[in-house]
Image (spheres, grey):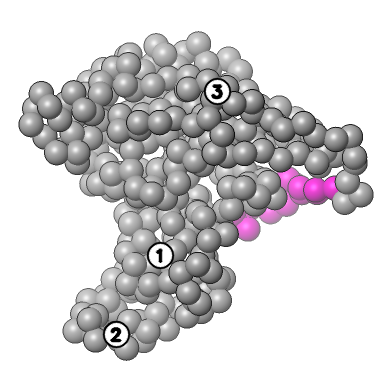
Amino acid sequence: MVFGQVVIGPPGSGKTTYCNGMSQFLSLIGRKVAVINLDPANDSLPYPLYECAVNIEDLVKLSDVMMEHALGPNGGLVYCMDYLEKNIDWLQSKLEPLLKDHYLLFDFPGQVELFFLHSNAKNVIMRLIKKLNLRLTAVHLVDAHLCSDPGKYVSALLLSLSTMLHLELPHVNVLSKIDLIENYGKLAFNLEYYTDVQDLSYLQHALGQDPRSAKYRKLTKELCDVIEDYSLVNFSTLDIQDKESVAKLVKLIDKSNGYIFAGMDASAVEFSKIAVRNVDWDYYRYPSFHLFQSCDSHIHKTFWLFNYGSSFASASSNLYV
C-alpha cells in the first residue's frame, strides 16, 4: 500500500507552501516524499531539492489552453482537469516508479468547483486509488482569517461540507495560517468555537447585527441547519512554521489514511528523530537553496510523546469514508 495526501483548498489558502513544508517535515522524520504538482497554474514551485516528482505542465499548460481555446483561467483549469482525466495513463505511468517507497503529496489547483461540483478531479483520484492501491487523505486548507467574518466562516463550512460529500475520501479540514489570525482583529468567540463548529445559533445572531446580512437571516439559518444536521465538519489548526503544529496534523492524517497501522513501530521511530533533535527549516526556501539548517547535538529534556494506541475518538469527526 502507498500512502499520501490530496491537498486542496481555495486560492491563497497555502497549498503549495503546505506541500513544501510538509515534504520537508516528513523527510526529517525519515519518509521519502514525492510531490506531485497537478496545478497547471503553478508558476513557481518552492519544493525542496527538486521541483517536483511529477509536474502536470509536462502534459498540459494552462497558458497554452487559455490561448488556444480562448478560455479564462477558470474554464482553462476545468479543461486541464478534463484533459488529465482523459490521459490518466500518463499520470499513472509517472507514479508507478514512486510506489515502492515514497509517500505522495498531490498539490491540486485552487479552483474549488473542481472538488464539490465537477467530477473530473474526483475521477482522477478514484482511478489512481483503484489502479495503484493508494491510501489517500484529503487535506482541505481554509485560511484562518475567514473566522474573523461570520459570513465568510459559514461559506467555508459549506465549502468544506460539500467537498467532503463530493470526494468521499478520509478528510481533514485545516485552518491554515493560524499564526496570522490575530492580524485580522479579535474573534467574536474563542478559537475552539470555530474549530469544533459549535452551536451556530450564536453566529446567526452575530450575522443578524450586520445590516448587510440581516435580510438574509432566514437563508443563513437554513444553511446553518444543514451544516449542523450533517455534523461532519470540524477543523484542525496549522502553523506551517511550527514543527509541533505540523507533527500534530501528521498524526491525525496518519490515523485517517491508516499509515500508523501499516507500521506502528516505524511511525514511533520517525517522530523520535524529531524529538531528540533541535531541528528547524525554512518553508519558503526554493530548490536552489540548501534544505536543512545545521542542527546541534543538544538533546531536549522534554520529548514529544505520541500515543498512537489512543482511541479514534479524537479524530473520528475528521474522517469521512
The residue that appears at 39% across and 11% down in the rendered structure is 93
Q: Quadrant of residue 236?
A: bottom right
Left or right: residue 66 versus residue 261 is left
Residue shown at the point (38%, 56%) measured from the top left: 160
Q: Nearer the viewer, residue 287 or 40?
A: 287
Q: Position of residue 155 (x, y in %)?
A: 32, 64
Name the residue that disc number 2 marks: 210
Q: Amino acid at mark 1?
A: Leu
User: Which range of residues does the magenta coloring cover?
Assistant: 303-316
**Whole-percent x, y for residue 44 in the image:** 40, 31
Where is residue 43, by image quadrant? Answer: top left
Q: Quadrant of residue 214?
A: bottom left
Instruction: Classify the position of the N terminus by image quarter.
Output: top right
Question: Mark 1 packing: few (<14 Cα in 10 Å), some, or many (20+)?
Answer: some
Disc number for residue 288: 3
Of the two numbered discs 2 and 3 on the same chain, state the one appearing first in sequence: 2
Q: Nearer the viewer, mark 2 or mark 3?
A: 3
Residue 11 x/y as whole percent: 34, 47
- Disc 1 designates what residue? 146
Three-letter residue code for mark 2: Asp
301 in relation to 81, above or below: below
Residue 122 within the segment the image draws in magenta: no
> Label 3 sits on what residue type?
Ser
Residue 310 magenta-highlighted: yes
Q: Secondary structure at mark 3?
A: loop
